[in-house]
Image (cartoon, coloured by chain):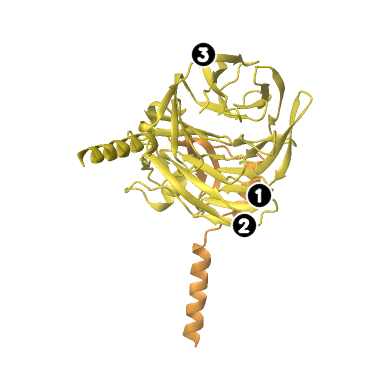
Amino acid sequence: MLSCIVAIAIATMVGKKTYESHAPKTGGLLLQNIEALSQGDITVVGCKPMKNATCYVFDGNGQLVDRRKNQYKGD
Amino acid sequence: MKKTYLILLLLFVSFSCCRKRDTMTKCDTEILHVTGGITLKDAHNSINQMVSTDSVLWIGSEHDRKSVIFAYSFDGNLLASGVEYGRGAGEILELTSLHPSQKGSVALYDGRAGRLNQLSVNGTNIKLDILRDSLFLYDDAVILPGKRIVTLPVHSSFSYILSDLDGDVIANLSYFPPKPKTVDENTHILACTGTLAVAPDGKSMVRAIAYDGGLDFFSIDDDRLSHKKRYSLFEMDYDALDGRVKLPIPNHNSRTGYSSLCSTDKYIYASYSEAKVLDNPDGECKEIHVFDHDGNPVYKLLLDREFSSFTVTPEDNFLFVACDIDGKTFLIKYRLAEN
């Protein structure tokens, strides 16, 4: 019985971690990044022009914090 | 008997040639010549968005100008201008897209501020009002008739979402064109960004994405989004940058493909180039391929010059393209023949 409960708990945690939301998460870190973005505090560097491509900025936790349209990540 | 076979063969061949237009190469080509132009008041530094409504040409320009949005009449008179970059009310952080909205109006999506806005003209000023917020960093967001919104997430397993104005999801769709064999799924999701055009009746849409020589056609029903057809001249080709997140980047084989889109009641217009992306980063084209709303190629337009942005008037009678001539930006006007 105990092993079943543990298995269900682990499965729930794994499922929660792998679920991808289609909308920006409202967890603390990403919300802070969105606020920084709306205040113009994030500066994107290292992007080159390319029509229809996107240059992405991810933070150290792999969260998307900004993007530039019509550019790609290049030095 | 021989005569019967010959007649049947002739009928079959003529039917095939006239009606089977499964590729643009089999379609009629119209070579366009300039019929007029508009010299834009104040040199615009790269026009990246153009939309035409019933009698107005809407232009979105790069951000080193005070005003970002300009409205011209079809014969070249500046009617209004406005909308500035900034963090204040009525200002934008990014001109992500312009799309026709309700009859005669235009909606502006600002992905970095997370807002879908309605543009309106008040005298000679253009102002914007928020339709919906909290739409951060989508590839695009478009308002449909009936106050529904299509949003295009990035970094998500869903590529298209249909919702109402309150944000309640009605339907979603996970569709991505075929990926290069050497690229993983996450990188491919990040690569699939581009441009969207929605039919004026809001019942279909078409997407062109980076690195891709294809167009994808979708149906928009009351409660469903579905992919109905892919038309492709070449498949996506790009590389992935090494790193924690493998970002998509062009390689020496990556080509421009379909670059900009415009939808009228009758047709979908898509600019096209075979040029390598690294030689043509602005996506300039000299061809426009014309499709019906089921994704069937109809005919091809060849222009006498390269352009990066274009729009077609709602009655399919004029094409406007933005061109740089000796450092000044002009809108070149072409009359389209009836098809």
Q: Amino acid at mark 3?
A: Ile
Q: Which disc, if any, is residue B170?
A: 2
Question: Front-most of B9 and B236?
Answer: B9
Residue tagged 3 = B325
Mark nearer the viewer, 1 or 3:
1
Q: Which disc, if any, is residue B312?
A: none
Q: Which chain gets the yellow colouring?
A: B
Place residue B201 in its image quadrant: top right
Residue visible at 63% across and 53% down? B163
Q: Secondary structure at mark 3?
A: strand
Q: Colour of chain A?
A: orange
Q: Quadrant of the N terminus of chain B?
A: top left
In the rendered view, tell whether residue A23 sits above or below residue B28. Answer: below
Residue visible at 42% across and 45% down? B230
Q: For the residue carrying disc 3, how many other residues have a C-alpha within 10 Å: few (<14), some (14-19), or many (20+)?
A: few
Question: Residue B25: x and y, percent?
Answer: 36, 32
Q: Are marks 1 and 2 in contact (CB under 8 Å)?
A: yes
**Chain holding disc 2:** B
Residue tagged 1 = B148
Residue visible at 55% across and 35% down? B266
- Residue B261 in sight: yes
Dot 2 and dot 3 within a common chain:
yes
- Residue B134 in sight: no
Place residue A74 in its image quadrant: top left
Question: Residue B148: x and y, percent?
Answer: 66, 49
Q: Outermost residue, bottom direction?
A: A1
Question: Front-most of B315 and B214?
Answer: B315
Dot 1 and dot 2 within a common chain:
yes
